Image (cartoon, rainbow, N blue to C red):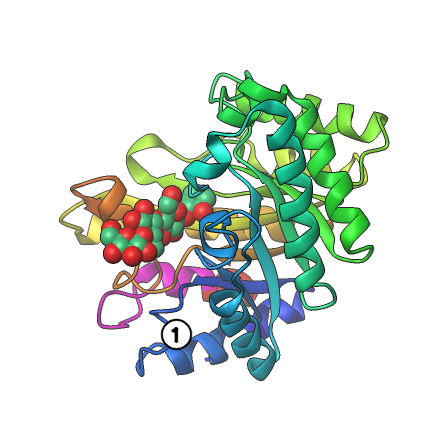
């Protein structure tokens, strides 16, 4: 069977993986990153706490390492992420509004300039919304109001005229209050002339919460605004231990996400948030849950792998 990236390319999409620096030296994993995927996202290496841990002191070693692996593999890179409320150093969070606004500008200018010409896309603003569709009351919003979003996109565009600029969030995959709010927010940004190219749908799913409603229709309505859409952080967790029933449900969820993206012309690709259950954020964040990815801890293909493969292959 051909690797996932080959089937995705035949359908006009990329198939990507999120990787961390400690993972890409894993001798068992490294060749699979190269063979299965056509796109990489650094899971942590380009976040603010990595790139500007101290004010004005930029550090690109970890991000560069992933970009150079991608280049060696002929893969594109999605930059992740410029403005978020997590993994942002205390020095940022402690600034007053005026200083925070200029730190935002300075951070984006430096980081986007550094990677200019090397990335396919940037997640400019990550997770700005609450699940009920109100604005998340992060330190960004509390100090700057919602204008930080437009400012961030404008700064990114000024630093790289060609990279695709995305807003990215979770629990926006199906129709609902949060995706409605994202739709309204994006419409408002477009009407103000804010340079935004795409909307990222993280798709951190869990079998115990059901599959998002009308995912294809939801992706399509954003595409109909003239934007690209992408599945940016796909995984499907479950309560442990896994069993054959749960793994079969998980496989169906993965297939449904692939099918939704394939059905939307402007859906440019799918990124899984890791490939092997050996490296996944889930057990640390949701104790007792896991097994969220396509291959197990020993890199054995799970039913979800076959489901993704067959969906991409048109089976
Ligand atoms: O780097 C430190 C290390 O020095 C320290 O010894 C260790 C001890 O805990 O922690 C290490 O940092 C961890 C970091 O990942 C790097 O491995 C953090 O504790 C841990 O919280 C962090 O988790 C990341 C998480 O974002 C943080 O919010 C996950 O790896 C990463 O996969 C996850 O990714 C997010 C996306 O960016 C946005 N969407 C949701 C997604 C899942 O939470």
In percent of width and height, residue 181 lies at 61, 21
* Element under disc 1: loop
The reply, left or right, for residue 11 in relation to residue 306 is right
Give 313 or 163, whichever is nearer the viewer. 163
Depth check, front residue: 79 or 251: 79
278 part of magenta stretch: no
Image quarter for residue 268? bottom right
Residue visible at 30% across and 81% down in the picture: 28
Q: Residue 143's spot in the image, x, y percent?
A: 57, 20
Spot occupied by residue 303 in the image (x, y as percentages of width and height): 32, 61
Q: What residue range appears in magenta?
A: 295-308
Query: Magenta stretch: residue 296 in it?
Result: yes
Number of marks present in the image shown: 1
- State which quadrant residue 105 falls in: top right
Q: Quadrant of residue 30?
A: bottom left
Measuring 39% from the left and 40% from the top, which residue is drawn there? 205
């Amino acid at each position: 069977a051909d690797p996932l990236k080959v089937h995705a390319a035949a359908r006009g999409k990329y198939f990507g993986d999120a990787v961390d620096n400690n993972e890409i030296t894993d001798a068992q994993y490294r060749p699979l990153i190269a063979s299965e995927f056509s796109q990489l996202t650094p899971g942590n290496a380009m976040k603010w706490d990595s790139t500007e841990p101290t004010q004005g002191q930029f550090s690109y070693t970890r991000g560069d390492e992933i970009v150079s692996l991608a280049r060696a593999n002929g893969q594109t890179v999605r930059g992740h992420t410029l403005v978020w409320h997590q993994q942002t150093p205390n020095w940022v969070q402690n600034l007053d509004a005026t200083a925070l606004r200029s730190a935002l500008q300075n951070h984006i200018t430096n980081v986007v300039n550094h990677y200019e010409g090397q990335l396919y896309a940037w997640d400019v603003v990550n997770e700005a919304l609450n699940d009920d569709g109100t604005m998340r009351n992060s330190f960004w919003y509390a100090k700057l109001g919602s204008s930080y979003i437009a400012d961030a996109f404008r700064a990114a565009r000024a630093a790289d005229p060609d990279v695709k600029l995305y807003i990215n969030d979770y629990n926006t995959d199906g129709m609902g209050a949060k995706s409605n709010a994202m739709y309204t927010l994006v419409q408002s940004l477009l009407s103000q002339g804010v340079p935004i190219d795409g909307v990222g749908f993280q798709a951190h799913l869990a079998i115990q919460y059901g599959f998002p409603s009308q995912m294809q229709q939801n992706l399509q309505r954003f595409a109909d605004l003239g934007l690209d859409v992408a599945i940016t952080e796909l995984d499907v967790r479950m309560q442990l231990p896994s069993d054959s029933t749960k793994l079969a449900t998980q496989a169906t969820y993965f297939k449904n996400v692939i099918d939704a993206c394939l059905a939307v012309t402007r859906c440019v690709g799918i990124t899984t948030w890791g490939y092997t259950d050996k490296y996944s954020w889930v057990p640390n964040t949701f104790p007792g849950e896991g097994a969220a990815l396509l291959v197990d801890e020993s890199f054995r293909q799970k039913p979800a792998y076959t489901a993704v493969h067959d969906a991409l292959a048109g089976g």
